Amino acid sequence: MRETDWQTPLGEAYRLALAHLTGLPDRPVGSGKARPALGGPTPETPTPAEEVVRDLVAAATPGLVATGSGRFFGFVIGGATPAALAADWLATAWDQNAGLHATSPAAATVEEVAGRWLVDLLGLPPHASFGFVTGAQLANLTALAAARHEVLRRVGWDVETHGLVGAPPIRVFAGAGRHDTIDRALRFLGLGTGSIVAVEADGQGRMRVDALRTALATHSGPAIVCAQAGNVNSGSVDPLGPIVDLAHAAGAWVHVDGAFGLWGMASPATRPLLAGVERADSWATDAHKWLNVPYDSGLVFCAHPAAHRAAMSVRAAYLIHSASGDRDPLDHNPEFSRRARGFAVYAALRALGRSGVADLVDRCCALARRFADRLSAADGVTVLNEVVLNQVLVGFDGPDDRTHAILDAVRKEGTCFVSGTTWRGRAAMRISVSNWLTDEDDVDASVRVILKIAGERGRAS
Ligand SMILES: *Cc1c(COP(=O)(O)O)cnc(C)c1O
């Protein structure tokens, strides 16, 4: 091996990655070609690495969506801060297997440190356990596996040994405005979507406390309540304090899906919105959303470390399990071998600090309100939600087809990327402000384009 074997392809990757990042402000934000020219027959013979890198970049670029742009407002997709991105590159170069302490004391330790920092930053109970997973989908799965373990343990059933055949049934009380990853997690866990009791939501998508009270009153036996911090459309947060009170009085486990909304705990301004969240039993969130860590990076926390480990831990003769009390990451997540995601999370937290995370949350919320104020000032445009966090739902007068046409035209124009949804039976535009790069000029330029396009597409018809 020569030094240039590394230098040439990595140098090319660095040069081209930098060109991508610095070019973001000037390129259209929308998607390019649906199917970039990446095909061809199966390669029969070797190609030099630097050529592979150059060709890949050339072929992939037209199909890249500028999700890292400050004017990308689709779904809930954060950008990447420089420190997090750099640390993520190092995680790749170091190629650590973060499954065990023995396979990477550095990766295991950095997760332990970053996990503790997060518990503190998010105001969770100091004894909470945590796991680094791919995203909120797996965080929800992990937390609900811990919940399944604990609610069945309390009635004398060992689900890890005996599975669910013959087990007492578990009911899952979840808000009608829940994220679909809850349903999918329950499918994976063998509880099935049939275990869900959908609890009515209010006009903002928040679980109704009176409806939960009624639902719980008619139930006995093992129960899990799934609450939500941050509705994917409206950003609304369930009334967590009253939900925890009711659920715990009924002996239920409370899980909170806070994929982006849990970050509201990092700012004194938004913290009151989540009052009571710290009394739940488990939490899911994403570092790849509001913390702006590169994909993929999710986090699970659990107030019952023994249940968390009972659901996830694994022992195998050929592994070297830590005997000295060091934390083996694979006891806390569904993966076995795993990317060392902790480095990027650690770097993000170190670079931002407590004040920087709070500022990131506050800035996104303020910019969401700026969107809402400017758009709702226009004729025929209505902001449909209470803008409590970083999400704005926009309704346009006229039929749904007009809204769809506006969404398409805005994305084609390329200044910004917005996505759509159905909100209370009608088509709406969704705007999510989740990127550290977004500034007032980005918002104002996007508002101008949205209103211009809406104006061009008449109101009647
Ligand atoms: C985004 C989101 C999820 C899914 O998160 P992934 O990181 O895509 O797995 C789950 N719940 C809520 C509320 C979300 O916003």
Image (cartoon, rainbow, N blue to C red):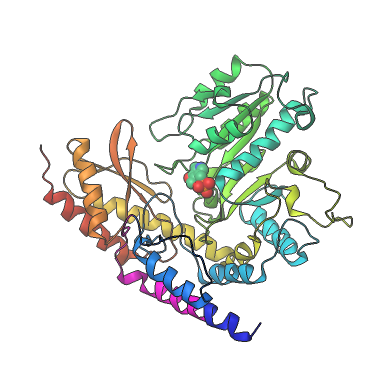
Q: In which quarter of the image is residue 277?
A: top right
Residue 423 visible in the shown view: yes
User: What residue occupies the far bottom of the structure in this picture?
Assistant: 3
- Please tell me which residue lies in front, 371 or 100: 100
Residue 36 as seen in the image, left or right of residue 407: right
Left of 198 or right of it: where is 154?
right
Q: Is residue 21 magenta?
A: yes
Question: How far across and how far down the image is residue 36, in percent?
Answer: 35, 60
Q: In which quarter of the image is the C terminus?
A: top left
Q: In this view, which residue lies farthest toward the top?
A: 218
Q: Position of residue 257 (x, y in %)?
A: 55, 41
- Image quarter of residue 222: top right
Q: Can residue 276 be seen in this view?
A: no
- The part of the chain drawn in magenta is 11-34
Which SS does the magenta portion mostly show?
helix
**In this view, which residue lies farthest toward the front?**
44
Give me the residue at 81% from left, 61% from top: 102
Q: How many marks?
A: 0
Report x, y in % for residue 117.
67, 59
Front residue of 74/122: it is 74
Q: Position of residue 5 (x, y in %)?
A: 59, 81
Magenta-colored stretch includes residue 215: no
User: Which quadrant would the N terminus be assigned to in this image?
Assistant: bottom right
Q: Which residue is drawn at 60% across and 44% down?
A: 138
